[in-house]
Amino acid sequence: MITPRSRALLDRYALASRALSRESGERMASEPGQSVEFHDFRAYQFGDELRYVDWRVYARTGRLMTRLFQAERSIRLHLVLDTSASMLLGGKARYARLLAQLLVYVAQRDAPTQVHLLDGRGSRTAQGLAAIGKSWRFLEEAETLRGEGAAPISALKRFALELPPVRSAALALVVSDFLEDAPLQGALAALRARGLDASLVQVMSDGDLEPSEGQLELVDIESGERLQVGPQEVRVYREEAHAFVRRTRAAALRAGFRHLLLRVPTSATEQELERYAFAALVREGVLIRR
């Protein structure tokens, strides 16, 4: 469970979403009391809408900064957690569940929140502090599955297609390594068709991106296939792993969604991991000050 210190910090933050600002902006004239309030800046990221760039800051500093907003209305959150076998490697499952717990705490205080696993299971939609413990227990009890049925990209597309179209501002936060040899575009198109904003939180380990060179045996944890490799093959793998992340990011941005790459901290205690996760979500603009 999240420590009291982290809860006190999280109480100062809210979720950021383009859908929330967009929906509120459209309704300001017809819904009294609804407004969008500026909260903070972050460095401009490729794919950010130019209308949110603060050109006065750019004129003063030469740096492109994106304005972040929080609206005076809540956003429904669908938090989607990858429980496929590849998440067992490099501490990804542990880190991903911790990220999910932090996000649930922030979202569920104010807005309807539902946790989904990519094997098809889901928690009940809940809102309020009293129900956060149940959502956390659902995350803690999530079993990492093995087999083709839990492959993340195919499962994400199924999740989106089975979700009813949303009628108000809604955000899908997908926490996964996205390690599947399948195109991502179909899953992203399905999320857009349901009217969702989305952020892809790609969790990767050092072993995924920077394996040490040498005579190694690669094991496909999904299929059990084994392959003997040497330094040259490891270098080729490393290049392809980084290219895979770039392709995932490009697909997300083309769909109008956000992409974040979060690397699992190495040799971290539980409390250190919690601090790293919180800092990463703030740094990437997923959480903004209230």
Image (cartoon, rainbow, N blue to C red):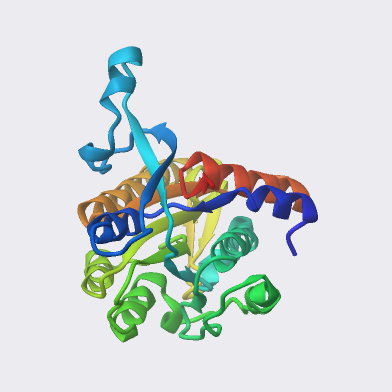
Residue 234 location, quadrant: top left
**Residue 43, relative to residue 123: is it above or below?**
above
Q: Is residue 146 visible?
A: yes
Count how many numbered circles sit on residues in the image.
0
Residue 137 at x, y percent in the picture: 69, 77
At x 51%, y 83%, the residue is 122
Query: Could you tell whether 77 is left or right of 109 in the image?
Result: left
Picture coordinates of residue 62 (x, y %)? Answer: 31, 15
Given residues 70 and 45, the one toward you in this image is: 70
Percent of width and height locating residue 178: 41, 62
Please determine whether, in this image, residue 116 is positioned above or below residue 201.
Answer: below
Q: Going 64% across and 60% down the picture, which residue do you hit?
A: 98
Q: Is residue 214 visible?
A: no
Q: Nearer the viewer, residue 146 or 288?
A: 288
Q: Position of residue 276 (x, y in %)?
A: 64, 44
Residue at 38% from the left image edge and 55% from the top image edge: 17
Farthest front residue in view? 32
Q: Which image quarter: residue 171?
A: bottom left
Residue 204 as seen in the image, left or right of residue 54: right
**Which image quarter holds the N terminus?**
bottom right
